[in-house]
Image: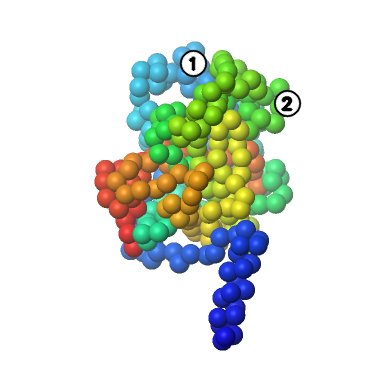
Amino acid sequence: MTNSAKMLLIATALTGILGFAPALAAPNWSAVPAKDVTLFYPGQSSWEWSLTTADHPGADKFRAGKNCAACHTGDEKTMGALLASGKKNEPTPIAGKPGSLIAKVQFANDGQNLYVHLVFSDAGQPNAKMDNAYDTKVAMMIEDGSVLEANRAGCWGSCHEDSAAMPAAGGADRTMYLPKTRAHLSRQGGGDALAADLQKLKAGGYELEYWQARLNPGKPASAANGVIFDKREETKPTAVTAEATYSGGTWSVTLSRKLNAGAGFTPIIPGKRYTVAFAIHAGHTAKRFHYVSFERSMVLDQGDADFVASKK
C-alpha cells in the first residue's frame, strides 16, 4: 500500500471516530449570481409581539396573511437603527452597535451537496463581551414548508416572549422553540407545558433545521447544526461543514452539507421550494443579540425563488 493510500485510510477512520465532516470543494463563487440581504437588529421583538395589534402596527395584516418580507423588505436599516438605539423593544442596548449589516449571499450545488456563501463586513462592531469563545457566528435556517410560522416569518417562528433574555423569560434560559409544541400560547409565550401530540408533529416534519459557522479571525471555522422543535438542540456529529476567511474586516463564509444527509435532516430535492433565513452574531454577542434577515425562498437547480442553487 502506498503512503498516500495509507493517509487516506487514516483520514477516513478519523472522520468516523471523531465525528467531523470532511471539507468539501466549494464552487467558484465568482461565477455564481449573488444577492444582497440586509440583516437587522431585532431587539426584543417576539413572535407574540408580531401578532399583537397594540404593539405591532402591522399585526392585523400579518394575521390576515401578509408575510414579514412582503411588508418590510427595504425597511431593515431603519428598523434596525431604531431597535439598536434602545428607543424601542430593547431595554439593554449595546453602545455603538450598528443597526444592520449587509451580506452578499450565494447558493450553489454540485449534485451531492448544497453550499451557501455569505460575505459581509464587521466594521464598527463593539465587543459585547457576551461570547468569549467566538467573535462571530453565522447561521442559516432552512425548512421545506412544514413549518408555517417559519415560512411566513423566518426566524420569528421560533423566537418567543419567554425565551432567554426576552421580556417574559423571568430568568429562565429557555431556548428557541416552535409554537405548536406548546400546550398553550399566550402573549407571554408558551412556557414549559408541552403539547400532547409532539410525536405526531415531528413525524409530519414540523421542525426547523439550522446550520452554523463559529468564527474567530485567523482560525479555522467550526461547524454546527441542529433542529428547533420544542427546544433548540444541536446535532452531533454535525452534518455541516464550514469554511471561512477574514481579511480587511470582511468575512467570507461557506456552509455546506449533503443534499440528503439521512434521518433527522431536511432532504433538499430539485424543484422544491424552501424557506431560508439568516442570522449573524457579530462582536462577541450571544443569544438574541444578533442580526436577522426576513424569510427568503430557495430552490435547487431551477424554479421561481429568491435564490436558485444552480449546479456548479
Q: Quadrant of residue 10?
A: bottom right
Which mark is first along the chain, 2 or 1?
1
The residue sitting at the bottom extreme is 2
Q: In terms of secondary structure, where does tag 2 sit?
A: loop
Position of residue 284 measured from the top left corner of the image (x, y, whole percent): 65, 47
State whether residue 126 is above or below residue 58: below
Near mark 2 (Cα within 10 A), the count class, few <14, some 14-19 or many ≥20, is few
Describe residue 106's horizontal placement relative to residue 20 as left or right: left
| Residue bearing mark 2 | 171
Describe residue 92's horizontal placement relative to residue 21 as left or right: right
Q: Is residue 136 visible?
A: no
Position of residue 275 measured from the top left corner of the image (x, y, whole percent): 40, 39
| Residue bearing mark 1 | 52
Disc marking residue 311: none
**Residue at point 55%, 40% (across, down):** 227
Position of residue 110 measured from the top left corner of the image (x, y, whole percent): 37, 61
Describe residue 271's horizontal placement relative to residue 41 as left or right: left
Give the amino acid type for the residue marked by disc 2 in the picture. Gly
Foreground of the two, 271 or 307: 271
**Residue at point 52%, 43% (across, down):** 264
**Residue at point 63%, 67% (across, down):** 14
Q: Quadrant of the C terminus?
A: bottom left
